[in-house]
Image: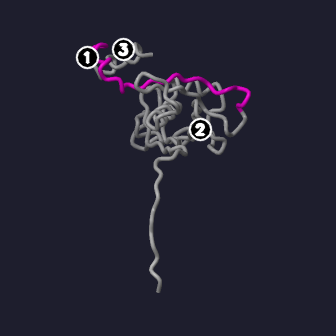
Amino acid sequence: MESIRRAGAVMMGLASSTDAAAKVRGTPKLAIVSAPKPENANDPHVASIHALAFSMGKPHPSLQLTGAACLASAVCIDGTVAFRAASNGAMWDPATPERTPSPVSEHSESSSAFALMPDRKTVRISHSSGAIEVDVAATSSESFAVVERCVVSRTARRLFEGKVYYYQNEV
C-alpha cells in the first residue's frame, strides 16, 4: 500500500519522487473499496460501498470525514472505480428517486458542466467500525464531473468530558 501511495503522490504532483513522497506520509490517502454484500441488496440500511481506509501508513479504525466525502462523490460519478464497485449492490437510499435526464441549458445544446443539474443521492459507506451516510449533489458526463456539495454528519463518539460547577443565588 505504501509503494502505491508513494507512486500516486508522484503521479498527482504532490511529490517530486517516491523518496520525497516517503517523507510526507499523510497524502494522498488510500482506501480499498468493495461492493456491498449482494444478499442484503434490498435492505434500506445496506451500504452502497464498503471501504478500508488507510491513514499514515496504517488501516484507519473507521473512515475519515474527508475520505467519506471523497468516496461518496466518486460513487456518484459514472466511470470511477467506486461507481463500478457500488453498482454491484444497492446503490442509493431508497427514498432517492431514480435518475432522470438532466435538463439542458437554453444557452447551449452541448453537455457542458453548466448544462446539467446535479442529482442528490445518499451514499452509505460501511467500514470496519460501522457505517457513515453522505448526502451528495453531483453530476457527470463522459468529459467532466461536478460535485456541488457533500453533507456528512460525524458518527457518535465522545469528543470531551468535563464537569460544570454552578451555584444558585437564593432570592
Q: Give SS at disc 3.
A: helix
Q: Which residues are magenta?
A: 17-41
Q: Nearer the viewer, mark 2 or mark 3?
A: 3
Quarter of the figure that contains the N terminus? top left
> Disc 1 marks which amino acid?
Ser
Q: Few, some or many C-alpha atoms within 10 Å of disc 1 (few <14, some 14-19, many ≥20)?
A: few
User: Pointer 1: what residue?
Assistant: 16
Q: Nearer the viewer, residue 117 or 151?
A: 151
Quarter of the image where one finds residue 15: top left
User: Pointer 2: what residue?
Assistant: 99
- CB under 8 Å between callouts 2 and 3? no
Q: Nearer the N terminus, badge 2 or badge 3?
A: 3
The residue sitting at 65% across, 45% down in the picture is 95
The residue sitting at 59% across, 37% down in the picture is 131
In the image, is residue 96 part of the stretch drawn in magenta? no
Q: Give SS at disc 2.
A: loop
The residue sitting at 61% across, 27% down in the picture is 87
Q: Position of residue 155 (x, y in %)?
A: 54, 43
As measured in the structure, the alpha-carbon distance from the residue carrying label 2 to the one carrying label 3 is 36 Å
User: Pointer 3: what residue?
Assistant: 7
Q: Nearer the viewer, residue 80 or 119?
A: 80
